[in-house]
Image (cartoon, rainbow, N blue to C red):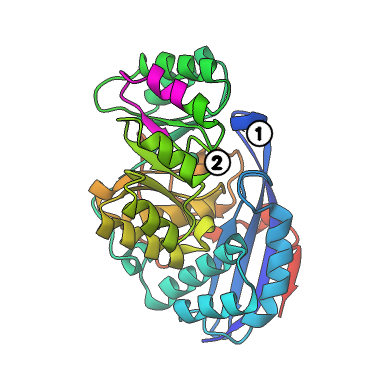
Amino acid sequence: MKISKITAWQVDLPLHEGDYKWSGGKSVAVFDSTVVRIETDSGIHGAGEVCPLGPVYLPSYAGGVRAGILELGPHLLGENPLHLDQLNKTMDSAMKGHPYVKSAIDMACWDILGKAAGLPVSSLLGGAYGEDFVLYRAISQESPEAMAENVASYKSEGYRRFQLKVGGDPDLDIERIHQVAARLGPGDKLVADANTGWLKHEAMRVVRAVSDVDVYIEQPCLRYEDCLSIRRNVTHPFILDEVIDGIPEILRASHDLAMDVVNIKISKFGGLTRARQARDLCMSLGVAMTLEDTWGGDIVTAAISHLAHSTPEEFLFSATDFNSYVTKPIAHGAPQRKDGRMASSADPGLGIDPIMEVLGDPVLEIG
Ligand code: MG
């Protein structure tokens, strides 16, 4: 089988809540997502998607996805989409770095592999565990009162795990954590995600002030070493995210005992191939995971669902259902959350079919 054509569409994804805010005053109102279709000489085609969290969260941006695919695409024509390790090697030979550019291409090839095998991607990733898997809800940064209300509201919809966007004014963040914790009960899990927003002295003040609260502390500071110094001074369970973007970083953090949970975002690692490698390594190291992506719609959510569903329950801290945050469906067959949980499709490949009327005209065609 050979790749014969690569097509990409740009799609705007507005949010039910209007906008999404996190540390340092950063926010996004409409997400700029890219959908990729890879066609083959056998007639099978696959779909992928990548959606950066705006241009200032990671070194990635939506326009860069399209520019990168335009650069990379011609190198992939004639390549076998079923040979995913070889395909990733080809991508790395043609373009150094830029994992997010490669993510939607890799994802679309997993869709093709599943369709060719007649199996859901979850089976190819090791097999689905149980009926469904657990989700978390990200709580956009607002006043402590508004965040507590939002948590209560999402809890009534079935979510039991909540990730508070803190990393702002430390005094307000202390109040945010206390007010939200007061709304939670046994079985609920609370994460305070600073998204690199605190300096070390601010992080230390916050963690000391919430020392009696059952809360996970996530990515308090920008640098790995600063996160490690906070980690060594607290008893809260500790999560790393932004500083972990490859296998060497996971090994280093494991060696340093720097994290109890890690966030594996598919596009941060460059696609499902590398995210699976990271997931399997974390299981060997005894590190639980949140499996997700930077953002996305139905296709990213479907890819997350296959990765999460094929991860043993004890290692899956949570996963994300981005398609319930955004207002616009972009694919038929996408998984839907129910009572704070989700199941991957049993159909071959990712189990989704892009809605062409929503995507409109393509922004680039290669081949
Ligand atoms: Mg995070």
- Image position of 79 with respect to 154: above or below: below
Question: To which quarter of the image does residue 307 belong?
Answer: bottom left
Q: Nearer the viewer, residue 41 or 176?
A: 176
Q: Residue 26 bears which disc, if any? A: 1
**Quarter containing the C terminus:** bottom right
SS category of the residue bearing label 2: loop
Q: Nearer the viewer, residue 155 or 262?
A: 262
Q: Does any portion of residue 345 appear in the rendered image?
A: no
Q: Secondary structure at mark 1?
A: strand
Callout 2 environment at 10 Å: few (<14), some (14 to 19), or many (20+)? Answer: some
Which amino acid type corresponds to the residue marked 2 in the rendered image? Leu
- Image marks 1 and 2: residues in contact by CB distance under 8 Å: no
Residue type marked 1 = Lys
Residue 170 shows in this picture: yes
Which residue is painted at 48% across and 73% down in the image? 112
Q: Which residues are magenta?
A: 204-217
Q: Position of residue 1 (x, y in %)?
A: 51, 87
Between marks 1 and 2, how big is the CA–CA gap? 15 Å
Q: Is residue 18 left or right of residue 132?
A: right
Taking 59 as reference, is 232 above or below it?
A: above
Reading the image, the residue beneath label 2 is 222
* Whole-percent x, y for residue 210 in the image: 38, 19
- CB at disc 1 and ligand 1 closer than 8 Å: no
Mark 1 or mark 2: name the one nearer the start of the chain: 1
